[in-house]
Amino acid sequence: MIEVPETKLEFTKELVRDTGRLIQSLMSQNLNIDTKQNAHDFVTNVDKQAEEFMVAAIQAMYPDQGFITEEKMIDNEVKHDMWIIDPIDGTTNFIFQKRNFAISVGYYEDGQPQFGIVYDVVGDEMYVGITGEGSYLNEQKLEPLDPKVVLKDAIVNADNRMFKTFKVDLDEHIMVQRYLGSAALEIIAVAAGRTNSYMSRRLKPWDIAAAVIILKEVGGTWYFGEHHDAIAYADKHEVFMSGSNATILESLIALR
Ligand code: 2AM
Ligand code: CA
């Protein structure tokens, strides 16, 4: 008999850990690598298998769930209970570095964020944000972010192409630039207080849906296209800009 978990959150934490183990075991075998829109937009058999595994488990446990997933192993459809899933965020890192990638699962009800999980598989760090309750790293509560840090003292994560969209030489207005290559892990770095901003020119809902729930619970803030401290379900690229506080985010917007 299948044991019914106490809550959807507990179920999902367990599922994400299981998916992490699946990814680790497949990672040591030969990867089957394809490209999507362009030569450097990769997807592997592992992205697809991991997504299929998660979707099947959720459907087996709960009826009538909606999904928005990157690899489209299920028809994407908006319902009251919504799962927004990126099985591997940071696929290029996954393929070439075998680290610095994450599983991202955001759970929304009636458009409202409930919980988000970002799991750094190789680092074995599970970040969980629960709306109204706080955010956690491996069950340890994250501290609220400092509301007083200003842009000139900020570590800003973004690629050079994002920096080039600014009216100014952004390097002159910040402490230092960094870039990792996994939107979920970079938003998490802001939430954990390791950096002060993450920005990207073109993200989709599954890149951010889980991490922003974690960010919001510690006082961080963001724009996703026109949406302020909110996401959109549409399968559409949007500019993403975030800050560890409103001063940093508004300063960045003023310079763009
Ligand atoms: P991915 O690894 O799941 O594709 C850095 O490249 C970040 O941008 C990663 O989080 C990556 O997610 C995301 N990204 C890269 N290309 C993308 C694309 N074509 N659409 C949406 N997100 C993309
Ligand atoms: Ca992905």
Image (tube, rainbow, N blue to C red):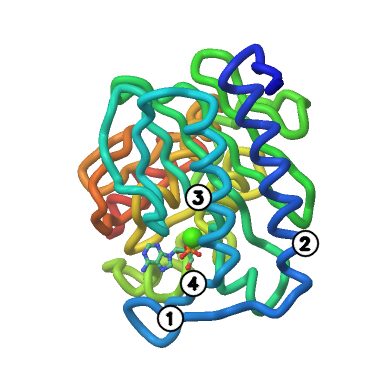
Q: List the residue tagged with mark 1.
A: 35
Q: List the residue tagged with mark 2.
A: 25
Sequence order check, earlier mark of 3 and 1: 1
Nearest the viewer among 100 and 75 is 75
Q: Is residue 54 left or right of residue 139?
A: left
Q: Amino acid at mark 2?
A: Ser
Judge the density around disc 1: few (<14), some (14-19), many (≥20) Cα neighbours within 10 Å. Answer: few
Q: CA distance from mark 2 to mark 3?
A: 33 Å
Judge the density around disc 2: few (<14), some (14-19), many (≥20) Cα neighbours within 10 Å. Answer: few
Nearest the viewer among 108 and 211 is 108
Residue farthest front in this picture? 1
Q: CA distance from mark 1 to mark 4?
A: 6 Å
Q: CA distance from mark 1 to mark 2?
A: 22 Å
Image quadrant occupied by the N terminus: top right
Residue farthest bottom in this picture? 39
Image quadrant occupied by the C terminus: bottom left
Which of pointers 3 and 4 indicates the residue nearer the eye?
A: 4
Sequence order check, earlier mark of 3 and 4: 4
| SS under mark 2 | helix
Residue at screen point 32% across, 33% down: 230
Q: List the residue tagged with mark 3.
A: 197
Q: Looking at the image, is 249 positioned above or below residue 26?
A: above
Which of pointers 3 and 1 indicates the residue nearer the eye?
A: 1
- The picture places residue 121, in percent across and down from the top left corner, at 72, 52
Q: Which mark is residue 43?
A: 4
